[in-house]
Image (cartoon, coloured by chain):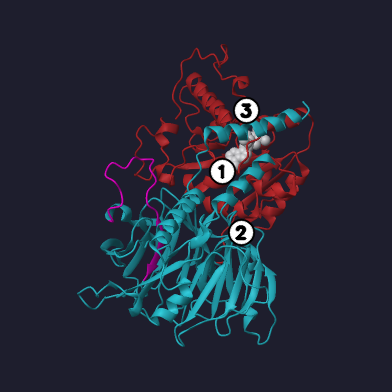
Chain colours: A red, B cyan
Amino acid sequence: MLEHESISNPTHSKTTGLPRKRFYRARAHSNPLSDSHFPVPIFPSQFDYSLHYPQFFPLPDRSDGSKKIEFADIGCGFGGLLISLSTLFPNTLMIGMELRDKVTEYVKERILALRASNPGQYENVSVVRTNSMKYIPNYFEKGQLTKMFFLFPDPHFKEKNHRRRVISPHLLDEYAYVLRVGGIIYTITDVEELGVWMKSCLDGHPLFEAISQEVLEADPVVKLLSTATEEGQKVARNGGQTFQAVYRRIASSFSH
Amino acid sequence: MEDNHMEEHDQKLETEVAPALIAVHPNQKFISVSIGSDLRLFNLQDGSGVTLLDENGGHKDSIRSIRYSKSGQLFASAGDDKLVKIWDTNSWRCIYSVVSEKRVTSLAISCDEMFVCFADKFGVVYVVDVRDYNNENRALVNTKGVPLLSHYCSIITRLEFSPDGKYIVTADRDFKIRVTLFPKEPLSGAHEIQSFCLGHTEFVSCLAFISSQDYPQGLLASGSGDSTVRLWDYASGSLLDTCDVGAKAGLLHSNQKQDEILPSVTDLCATSNGSRIAVAIQSLPGIMLLKCNLSSNTLSVIKVVSITAETFIPTSIGASSSVPLLWMVMGASSLQSNNFALLARVRVVSGFSDNSSVTVEPEISVLDDKEIPRGEPLLQILQGKLSIGEEAFSTAAEAVKTSMRNLLIKKQYSAERREFRKRGRNDKKNQTPA
Ligand SMILES: C[S@@+](CC[C@H](N)C(=O)[O-])C[C@H]1O[C@@H](n2cnc3c(N)ncnc32)[C@H](O)[C@@H]1O
């Protein structure tokens, strides 16, 4: 999927070799409810890691139970968080999931350009175009992920559109399935109403518990939530307030 | 707005035709057939039709799911009129009428018969507490369901409880089967997903649990638009075996193109000891009989039981747990030429049983109308008419095939339509001040 393009790409900046955002403009919002036609793996082992992480997987065969993706950035947008996490956790495989195809293309190009200009780095990040609200179980097995990120998701203000929100009581069931016990879900927004909503969904879910303030302060990832992404930087520039909710996946008390 | 409007409109057109359904009481006391909004019941013990007692006057639109509870005490029906009706099979009185916000696609009754679950066409499963149904003389309860779980914006095609009642299993049009722990107190939701059974490459159309005394937990079988039946270890989600039933029944052309639509599996029914599975397949006049080996986890074809005298392609099949008969129905609601409306054809196959002790296959044959238990009176009630013309069959087969395909196979929008949708969006965009 991430194939190398020629260096003299007109959509890329001549000086940095990085893709220029204006060539990847897209509609502001995609409707996550409508059916689109992009390929979706039938089951997680069908997802070809060698296309996404060629340095880690020279061959498509993953039958030896090797490394799996552990971090997922849902609705990754232009990919700022992934880029920061990549060097912070160089041995952890991570993926961005994004619905808009142009934006996904941009992130792909961005990663390839970074790999080209920083040999050996950014090999652990990739991006995939998909609807995370429908296809999470097609990409990840039970308990595979250790971190999931939901940074500045679309707010969908209207009551009747709340079912389009990426955090909802029912979708949390799926996130709890792919997160291993002890794994962490990070959410942040500049929309207070959405912040309250995400927090209340997580509070109401039996498989998640809030993480204490001290633990949060020691977590280097928490600082990135408001600073690493394009959306976060925009909010910061405008001096906007942010609301975050960070929860841990806990074991079920409903044991058999 | 524009988008939503079109979505709703599309769905309305595509779902108009509903297949006729059949459900058999666990002790074969009753046989139920639904066609369109019509619910027909025959009492095999006294040999007469049953009159349903419903203060609200029955279903108003196509019925999409009918089920008996495990003991046979309860019966439930639901469909396009957004109503779930729960009936007491002693009095055949409707004891609960549940209002859904959306059309109902499927339902199931928990093994302990305390809860009825139903799925709406936006992929949300609701649960209704029916624990107080035994109160004598209580009035009809009009109630609502409580959300239990959801397949995000997919159509749930089938709901099933595992034989031990521990799990609720949901199948959808996005090729998925989800296995969720069914909690003791389901009214606060079912949050713990045990597994996903992934492997089908088209919509999943039907589910059946295969269990026996030796394997009480059993295995799960599923049928799909990909023309296969698959066998799963449902607790882990592992695929154990795949049987290409469409190909084995000779329904695929050797030069079948990749994107051609395969004859989909429409229904599955297992014998009570799990060693035999009947499979209904679109375009197969008859059924295919599979053998399931629970110790080696394999599926194999025993034979195709063909129906020759008429073009009978079952739309739904069912069996009791005690009598070795497989009941089949063919029919469709709302056919274009409504001369044929509400005609259903019922056929029965004998010898549908396990044969763990015997080495020879039991004699399997399609019964003549007069050999069917209670013969003519039963057919008169369930079919709506004693004899049904051949044209009705082909019309029904075609209608059901088209509606199923449209509903469950992902739409590839025509260029024109896509353009129209895009225009709708641009118009909107142009209206918003810059
Ligand atoms: C407001 S942006 C935030 C992007 C990024 N996280 C940031 O902080 O800059 C939300 C992103 O989520 C994407 N998105 C919305 N629904 C999605 C879905 N169902 N699956 C994947 N991505 C989705 C949108 O396309 C959009 O790029």
From the top left corner, tell me how far across and down residue B154 is, in percent: 55, 51
Looking at the rendering, the quadrant in which ligand 1 lies is top right
User: Which one is nearer the viewer's eye here, B359 or B16?
Assistant: B16
From the top left corner, tell me how far across and down residue B197 is, in percent: 44, 55
Q: Is there a contact, CB below 8 Å, between mark 2 and mark 3?
A: no
Residue on which the image places disc 1: A132
Residue on which the image places disc 2: B103
Residue B426: numbered disc: none
Badge 3 crowding class, 10 Å Cα cut-off, few under 14, some 14 to 19, many 20 or more, is few
Q: Is residue B250 magenta?
A: yes
The chain letter for the residue carrying disc 2 is B
Amino acid marked by disc 2: Arg
All told, the count of numbered labels is 3
Q: Nearer the viewer, mark 2 or mark 3?
A: 2
- In the displayed structure, B29 sits above or below A118; it is below
Residue on which the image places disc 3: A26
On the rendered image, what quadrant is the C terminus of chain B found in? top right
**In the image, A225: left or right of A86?**
right
Q: Are marks 1 and 3 on the same chain?
A: yes
Q: Is there a contact, CB below 8 Å, between mark 1 and mark 3?
A: no
Q: Earlier in the sequence, mark 1 or mark 3?
A: 3
Q: Are marks 1 and 2 on the same chain?
A: no
CA separation in Å, label 1 and label 3: 18 Å
CA separation in Å, label 1 and label 2: 25 Å
- What secondary structure is the magenta-colored segment mainly? loop
**Mark 1 element type:** helix
Q: Nearer the viewer, mark 1 or mark 3?
A: 3
In the image, the segment drawn in magenta is: B249-270
User: Which one is nearer the viewer's eye here, A50 or A216?
Assistant: A50
Indicate yes or no: mark 1 CB to ligand 1 under 8 Å. yes
Q: Nearer the viewer, mark 1 or mark 2?
A: 2
- In the displayed structure, B326 sits above or below A225; it is below
